[in-house]
Amino acid sequence: MSLDAPAKSSAPNKLVIRNIGLLLSGDLDHPILDADTVVAIDGVIHAVGKEKDIDTTGANTTIDAKGTALAPGLIDSHVHPVCGDWTPRQNQLGWIDSCLHGGVTTMVSAGEVHTPGRPKDIVGLKAMAIFAQRAFHAFRPGGVKVYAGAPVLEQGMVEDDFKELAAAGVKFLGEVGLGSVKDGVTGRRMVAWARKYGIQSTIHTGGPSIPGSSLIDKDMVLETDADVIGHVNGGHTALPDDQIVALCERSPRALEIVHNGNERAGLLALRTAKELKQLHRVILGTDSPAGSGVQPLGILRMISMLSSLGEIPAELAICLATGNTAKMRSLNCGLIAAGREASFVFLDTAQQSAGKNLLDSIQKGDLAGVGMVVTDGAISIQRSRNTPPATRVPEVVRA
């Protein structure tokens, strides 16, 4: 090594968050923790508890939460990225960064189906999936982690194709039904191959969403047995009520409710899951970009809608967009616990909300105000440009 080369520091990067007023864990079984301090080292949560019991010395960055709530960064379980932070669906730049201002720190691709000239031959679809996986692994718009590279199933794929994709780092399939595989027998075989090599699957549910897609009814969903029942409330057109209820009752798989779906059907799915005592299966997405556009606050809006109209406590609704999704998607985020990724959103009651506190305001249907977002232990944004202004915001006291 050259004598003139600067020595690389081996000291850990330590983040301390103190004076937390409400710690929302993301865990459906224990949604609120009796803690006021979180310590992260090198982008991973190291300790959670009371400040008096935790070593907070030697911090590179200290954030005074000022009594606001700390929650895991929100996860959007269903997006359709294409290239960088641009979408041809609405010819819009910066949509992922804008979602960061809605508290979203992680996105999961359900297929890069809007890519102009999307290849449908097997060599081409595999190449595109591997390219997307590599590109978004290296590029994080605003700090958002995008799990991209989700190939759409096409007729003629064989087991070795899935083995090759998995070896290249592909972790998710695009929505079953958006390609030429339109029957449950073929879908089930390919889903099983994907699962064998650690690739998770999602199936389109409901009426067609784009030219070339088609109706996927409950019989095909059940026969295919994908890991996630994608937009169980339709994307955009929902199945009849009895079919939605049947999917909740007869499948053990994740029930994904999306913003760009039928809201009444989404509430039906939520209430059915609640009656079955299976809220752990419910996860949230936006299904954007789409014809409806991009919804930077889509996940926050889903949380408020499901809490206020679905009549579940706000702290549980937040779990649907964090810990539930992380567990169903096998992601190391979404929970505030030691060993998890240090990605957080600071929330507080929006100014002039009728709610007496953050959770009450969400229960009443208002959106929370985002005061700061942290991704992998680093501050990505401070006060959100998109949410209504939070009553209180955290403050960086040392950086």
Image (cartoon, rainbow, N blue to C red):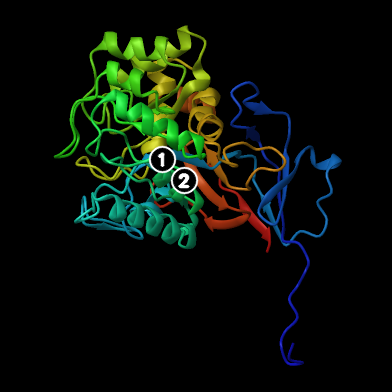
Measured from the top left, where is residue 43 in percent x and y? Answer: 65, 54
Viewer-proximal residue, 332 or 157? 157
- Corner quadrant of residue 228: top left
- Corner quadrant of residue 62: bottom right
Measured from the top left, where is residue 247 in percent x and y? Answer: 36, 14
Judged left or right of residue 284, residue 9 is right
Q: Amino acid at mark 1?
A: Glu
Residue drawn where x is 35% and y is 18% of the image:
222
Q: Which residue is mark 1?
A: 159
Q: Amino acid at mark 2?
A: Lys
Viewer-proximal residue, 344 or 323? 323
Residue contact at pointers 2 and 1, CB within 8 angstroms:
yes
Distance of label 2 from label 1 (alpha carbons): 7 Å
Measured from the top left, where is residue 324 in percent x and y? Answer: 53, 29
Q: Which mark is residue 163?
A: 2
Q: Which mark is residue 80?
A: none
Viewer-proximal residue, 358 or 4? 4
Q: Secondary structure at mark 2?
A: helix
Quarter of the N terminus within the rendering: bottom right
Q: Is residue 398 above or below residue 72?
A: below
